[in-house]
Image (cartoon, rainbow, N blue to C red):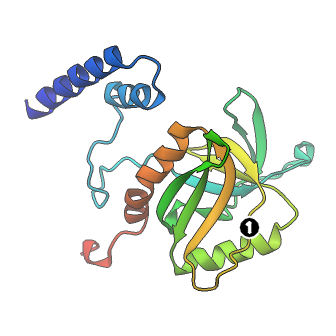
Amino acid sequence: MRNIYSAVCRVCGLSLLLAMTPGCEAIQEAWEEAMDPDTEITDNPNSTEYKRKYVVHINSIVKHHSRAGELEKEIPTLNGGTVWINTNQLFSSKHIKNAKAVARPGNPNLFDLQFEVDRFGRLQWQLLAGDHVSEQVALVVDGVYFASFYPELVKDDASAWVTLRVGLNAVTARGIARNAKNNYINLNPDVSHWL
């Protein structure tokens, strides 16, 4: 009964917001999430029922897919096309402790990302940036290709933050930033929860 009441309140509240601010991407996203029956069963990232959203993977792009092997697959893009990637992930949400969406100077409609990475993620990023210094990699979010970018080496050895110059829309960039911590917790369960 509590879940039904909560769902009705969310729908009514979001309906009122939609009526007051038509065309707003963030409100539209909230509406779609509220109406989606598969949306987050629980807000507790330690729960087995937690539904991950905006999960990030970085993969190599396969240029000659006509000879694609078992580790290569075709994934959808936002514009209805497809791109081929190597399914061996170079980096993922498993090592992103926190994220920020950063508006591009001079173009506030495009956002780049900054990730705070854990120790292992920092090592992975250094390998990724070193190996792909002149080769673009794919930013994949929830199994969909969003952008290609050149990974940048971290100049400050003490910094735990890396930057992705990807030029995303506001809804996607903010969704990644908003869900990064919970995805990290869910992908790296505390040892005390195993018992």
Between residues 24 and 116, which one lies in front from this camera angle?
A: 24
Count of picture labels: 1
The residue under the point 17% across, 26% down is: 9
Q: Is residue 159 left or right of 77 when viewed as pictured?
A: left
Q: Residue at x 45, y 46 (%)?
A: 53
Which one is nearer the viewer's eye here, 104 or 4? 104
Residue in the foreground of this view, choosing between 167 and 95:
167
Q: Residue at x 18, y 23 (%)?
A: 8
Q: Is residue 54 visible?
A: no
Quarter of the figure with the N terminus: top left
Question: Residue pushed farthest bottom?
Answer: 157
Secondary structure beneath label 1: loop
Residue designated by label 1: 152
Q: Outermost residue, front direction?
A: 106
Relative vertical location of residue 76 with respect to residue 153 in this rendering, above or below: above
Q: Position of residue 83 (x, y in %)?
A: 78, 40
Can you give x and y, in whole percent of width and height, for residue 23 in the image?
A: 47, 19
